[in-house]
């Protein structure tokens, strides 16, 4: 009975908690590119990308393109990504400081928990909601995606990263 109550791994002081930022790769350096420059580079999205997204993404997800970002969310969500929220997310990701403050998107607040070379992953501040946010930076476009129950981060993030790889093959 005592064994069940003691932790398997002794806790160390100074050990990061799960809610703290996990930097797996180096955070991208400050970029001189601005939101307006990205917006002028890409004015429309190829129809092949939309059909590819319908094949790769889970059923029930929709895509909304507004240069320089592609918003992906569940159809059942009544909340859409506002242009102001997208501008702030893209600008902060370009500057490399998206993880330093709460991120607002789709009418919710998120905390960025993981930073990678091209991706940011976040969870909803309200832990009772099983909602997550994924932001992937490509050469000329940002993918800003929101996943919700029944999708989990373990299911959704690899699918979205695969979709981002396919977009990168098309030089986006």
Image: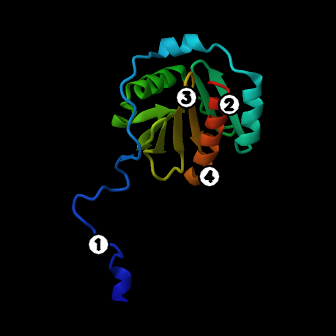
Q: Position of residue 31 (x, y in %)?
A: 40, 22
Helix, strand or loop under label 2: strand
Q: Check disc 2 and report the residue beneath it.
A: 63
Quadrant of the drawing holding the C terminus:
top right
Work out whether 65 lies above or below 149.
above
Crowding at dot 2, Cα within 10 Å, few <14 / some 14-19 / many 20+, comes out as some
Identify the mark nearer the N-term, 1 or 3.
Answer: 1
Quadrant of the drawing holding the N terminus:
bottom left
Q: Check disc 1 and report the residue beneath it.
A: 10
Crowding at dot 4, Cα within 10 Å, few <14 / some 14-19 / many 20+, comes out as few
Q: CA distance from mark 1 to mark 3?
A: 41 Å
Identify the mark nearer the N-term, 3 or 4.
Answer: 3
Instruction: In the rendered structure, find residue 106 and report the number of the disc placed on it.
Output: none
Identify the mark nearer the N-term, 1 or 2.
Answer: 1
Identify the mark nearer the N-term, 1 or 4.
Answer: 1
Residue 30 vs residue 147, the one in the foreground: 30
Q: Check disc 4 and report the residue beneath it.
A: 155
Q: CA distance from mark 1 to mark 2?
A: 45 Å
Q: CA distance from mark 2 to mark 3?
A: 16 Å
Identify the mark nearer the N-term, 2 or 3.
Answer: 2
Q: CA distance from mark 4 to mark 2?
A: 18 Å
Q: Check disc 3 and report the residue beneath it.
A: 138
Q: Position of residue 127 (x, y in %)?
A: 45, 51
Work out whether 113 lies above or below 4.
above
Helix, strand or loop under label 4: helix
Q: Position of residue 157 (x, y in %)?
A: 58, 46
């Amino acid at each position: 009975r005592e064994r069940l109550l003691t932790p398997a791994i002794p806790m160390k002081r100074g050990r990061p908690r799960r809610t703290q930022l996990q930097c797996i790769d180096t955070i991208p350096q400050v970029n001189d590119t601005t939101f307006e420059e990205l917006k002028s580079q890409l004015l429309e999205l190829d129809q092949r990308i939309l059909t590819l997204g319908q094949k790769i993404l889970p059923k029930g997800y929709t895509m909304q393109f507004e240069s320089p970002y592609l918003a992906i969310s569940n159809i059942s969500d009544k909340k859409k990504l506002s242009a102001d929220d997208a501008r702030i997310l893209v600008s902060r990701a370009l500057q490399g400081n998206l993880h330093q403050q709460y991120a607002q998107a789709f009418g919710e607040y998120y905390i960025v928990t993981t930073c990678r070379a091209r991706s940011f992953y976040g969870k909803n501040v309200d832990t009772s909601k099983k909602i997550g946010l994924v932001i992937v930076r490509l050469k000329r476009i940002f993918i800003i995606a929101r996943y919700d129950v029944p999708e989990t981060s373990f299911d959704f993030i690899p699918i979205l990263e695969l979709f981002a790889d396919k977009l990168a093959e098309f030089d986006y």
